[in-house]
Amino acid sequence: MTPGLIDVHAHIFEHGTDIGMDPNLAGVKSGVTTIVDAGSAGSGTYDGFHHYILPRSHARVLSMIHLGRGGLAYMPEIRDAKDIDIDATVAMVNKHHGEILGIKVRAVGPAVREMGVDLIKKAREAAKASGTRVMVHIGDPLWKVEPTLTARLLPLLEPGDIVTHLYTGAPGRLVDDNGKVLPEILDAQQRGLIFDIAHGRFNMNFDVARRLMDKGIVPLTVSTDLTPGGRDDMLKSMNHVMNKFLALGFRLDHVIRMATYNAAELIGMRDDLGTLAEGTTADITVLEEHEGDWTFTDSQRGTLKGTKALAPVLTFKDGVRYDVEYGPFPWGWLPNPRP
């Protein structure tokens, strides 16, 4: 029994974007009691997200608002500065105060080609004006990015800002072509930036993870970046991400902490969530630990062996019981058929 799992990076704007998950399949049916939608909606679409998704979700829903006005309703979501309205973004944050935690920006696509690091400066401007933080997506498997972009954008971020896709192997990753860790990420860690995993379809690489781990670069939180396409392919659920970190050598208690207590700290709810302390909210996930010979795959089809795997059994959100679904694999929740 653990505190309710908290996924700080998922996409649940179902029917509002092409990448929106059913919020309950991403949530209580998978052992997750709190979800942060990572920028599916922008200032022009956030009211729709608020009014149609939050009432449907049994899990608690918070969000990052996208810097682009349309969010991820279409991609590329920011082509140039005309797709950004900082005043409207700040107004929407203020309208949904406490629900919107910060500004999401993806350092990808035509916006990077047109604006360079000015894109990040716009996100910082919106975060400062709204009294929030920035979550910046690094790693771009679909568009050619400038090799030095990530190194140049990291110094622009401030303590408390979030670097998501920490262990990406896509262009824009935190290791150079010779496999050396960028010194800028070491500086970012010392300055108090927050590191999140956000596995997703394209942004987890075991070799990059090992190289960064060797330099002491580890995430505060594990998260999914869950989408329907990802769930059908590379990344199934929170417990699937947690299992990969067990295989990377993280201790069980550390992995659970990243998915609960640390995540509660990131969303500013550490006193009430991510804990089983008496008097706190009754968000609970029941997990089973299995021993076996498990095989895990990263976004570049690299493989990793593991001997432990977690599977969700029950979810309690605010004390209400929810049964989990059968599981995303034909054989259930475990990463491959148990020998």
Image (cartoon, rainbow, N blue to C red):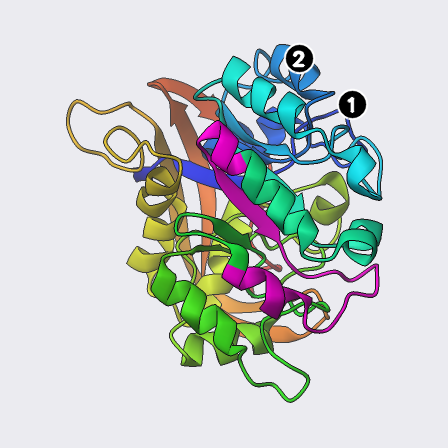
Q: Residue at x 49, y 78 (%)?
A: 183
Q: Based on the displayed image, in which of its 4 quarters is residue 315 positioned?
A: top left
Residue 331 location in percent, x, y? Answer: 64, 49
Whether residue 318 is visible, yes or no, is yes
| 285 lies left or right of 201 | left
Whether residue 296 is visible, yes or no, is no
Q: In the rendered structure, are the residues bearing label 2 and label 1 in contact, judged by CB atoms less than 8 Å apart?
A: yes
Q: Residue at x 54, y 22 (%)?
A: 93
- Say which amino acid is labelled 2: Tyr
- The residue wearing badge 1 is 15
Looking at marks 2 and 1 on the same chain, the residue that comes earlier in the sequence is marked by: 1
| 155 lies left or right of 111 | left
Q: Quadrant of the C terminus?
A: bottom right
Question: Dot 1, crowdedness within 10 Å: few (<14), some or many (≥20)?
Answer: some
| 210 lies left or right of 168 | left
The range drawn in magenta is 127-155
Residue 135 painted magenta: yes
Q: Residue at x 70, y 56 (%)?
A: 234
The answer for how far apart the CA atoms under marks 2 and 1 are is 10 Å
